[in-house]
Image: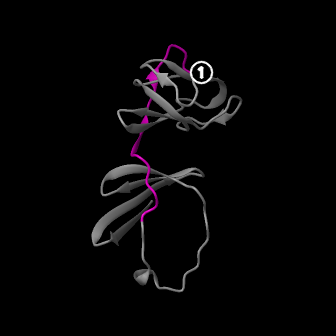
Amino acid sequence: MRMYSLSINDKNYDVIIKEVTEQDVKVEVNGVEHIVDIREIKNIVSSLPVSKQKTSLPHVSTPATQVQPVVAADPGEICSPMPGNVIKIYVEEGEKVLAGQKLLVLEAMKLENNIISTCAGVVEKILVREGQAVNQGQSLVVVE
């Protein structure tokens, strides 16, 4: 975990880098957690000393929260914890997943909620599609 104190346009930010994956970075900016999507990674070498470089925050998506799905009768069945819309699916049928891995993003009340796997296994079935509205308790993904 790394912490940075940044000043951008005379506004101060305390930024903590919490977790980095291939797709995104979990950061905390002034106490508020955000998921920052990684579009491209570039190695840039600058001749300016760090204290003189202009700094800007990367594009920050809507704050996302890590949400535990509703517990289903079948432990591998991942159900929606709330009504909302599926905006992004990160896994495919047949893919191996780990417990705690992000499966999809559910938008509810203008907030993005990461739906995570409750167990390790293989994605047997994806029961929803991107753009689909879902109800609380509705089955989303089956992991066996």
What residue is pinned by disc 1?
127
Under circle 1, the secondary element is loop
What x and y, as percent, mark residue 60? 43, 54
The N terminus sits in image quarter: bottom left
Magenta stretch mostly in which secondary structure? Answer: loop
What range is drawn magenta here? 57-77
- As drawn, 82 above or below 32: above
- Residue type at tag 1: Leu
Determine the image quadrant of residue 14: bottom left
What residue is drawn where x is 42% and y is 72%? Answer: 55
Answer left or right for 94 relative to 38.
Answer: right
Q: Is 70 one of the magenta-colored residues?
A: yes
Determine the image quadrant of residue 52: bottom left
| Badge 1: residue crowd in 10 Å (few <14, some 14–19, many ≥20) | few
The C terminus sits in image quarter: top right
What residue is drawn where x is 54% and y is 38%? Answer: 102
